[in-house]
Each structure stands twice: as structure tokens, then as C-alpha cells.
Image (cartoon, rainbow, N blue to C red):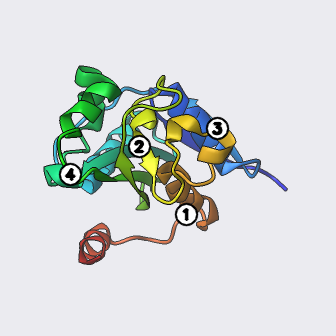
Amino acid sequence: MEKIRINACTSNTHKYRELVAILGDDFEVIHHPIELVELQGNPLDIVNAKAIEAYSKLKEPLFVEDVSLFFNAFNGLPGPYVKDFVTSLGAHGMYKLLKEFEDKSAIAICNIAFIDGNNRKVFTGEVKGRIVEPRGNSSFGWNAIFEVEQQKKTFGEMADDERNKLSHRYLAAKKLRVCKLPLAIIDTQEFLLEYYKR
């Protein structure tokens, strides 16, 4: 069977490798390390803006992704700004922020936006967990401080193939993988309204 060719726009090679592994042999994923503007706003606005910007540069069907990490004790922060928190504080610093709070629950969300010029759709994956003292491999983002609910292991303690079968990125990419491409026409405003009703 002929592979589906799809462009992945991310400057993060670790994310790219994970997405290739998750999407599997049915896809030929072409890496484009394009730097995209990191807007402020809600996660869906951010990923949609990144998709539009990437398409304006590449002019080919593509996907982008954006990850958020929500601390319930902080009313959702750092949310879509988690990259800035990791850069400034590191994973251990983020753990220390939450250390004195009783509620250490958190939600990791990955939004993948696919765009082909006429159509655009967002696929969302969500994993619940809690923030713990760093355990396991701490070389990538906040993996070592996010303990997956009911797993009792952090993403940092998991082998790549284990993490790639249950992560927020996996859940979003799985929806992209089973979607019929090219997409049917999507009314983006209607999609956003439906999303926020959840």
C-alpha cells in the first residue's frame, strides 16, 4: 500500500521522532524544522495560528502540534506556556512550585492541527496525572515530573515504545492517523464552539 505523505512542521526533533513512531508505517512524515511564532491565547487559537503560519510558508498539506500542561492548583497554569516554564525553571523548578500545594493533579494536552489550504482540523489528546518529584529520564521537557494516572510511572520512567502508546501526543496522533485524508470541509468556528461545550 502506498504511504500517505504528510509534512510535520516542528523545530523540535524529539517531538518529530515521537510522531513518526506513533503514526507508523502507513505515513511518510517529512520533517520541516520551521520556527513558528508562539502566540498567547487559548491552546486551540495557538495551534490553529501555527498551522496557518506554517502553511503560508510551506504551501503544502501539513500538521503542527502544540502541547499544554495544566496544574489544577494554579487554575490551569502553565497551560500552553509550559515551554517557557521549562526553559526558565526546569522540570525540578516546576515541581518545587507545586510542592507545597495539596492538589498536585495535572492534565497534559496535545493539539495537532492539520491544514491543506482549504481545510483545517484539530485533533486533541489528553492524559490525566499528577506532578511528582523528578523520576526517570529528565532530558526532555517535563516528562520526569508527570506521573500518569493509574500507571504510577512518570513519562520519564517509561521506555519510548511504552510512552508512545499512551501519551497525550499518541492520543492526538492516533486521531490524525485514522482520519480520512484529505479532510472534509470543516467549519472552524463551529468546531471551536463544539470543543468548548465539552
Task: Mark 4 or mark 3: name the one nearer the start of the chain.
Answer: 4
Q: Residue at x 65, y 37 (%)?
A: 159
Q: Amino acid at mark 2?
A: Phe
Give the position of the C terminus as an image quadrant.
Answer: bottom left
Q: In this rendering, would 44 be left or right of 35?
A: left
- Of badges 4 and 3, the one in the foreground is 4
Give me the C-alpha separation between circle 4 and circle 1: 34 Å
Q: Which residue is mark 3?
A: 160
Is residue 37 among the parts visible in the rendering?
A: no
Give me the C-alpha separation between circle 1 and circle 2: 23 Å
Q: Residues within 10 Å of mark 3 (few under 14, many from 20)?
A: few
Q: Residues within 10 Å of mark 1 (few under 14, many from 20)?
A: some
Secondary structure found at label 4: loop
- Of badges 1 and 2, the one in the foreground is 2
Q: Which mark is residue 175?
A: 1
Q: Amino acid at mark 4?
A: Glu
Q: Amino acid at mark 3?
A: Asp
Give the position of the N terminus as an image quadrant.
Answer: bottom right
Q: Which residue is mark 4?
A: 102
Percent of width and height locating residue 39: 20, 39
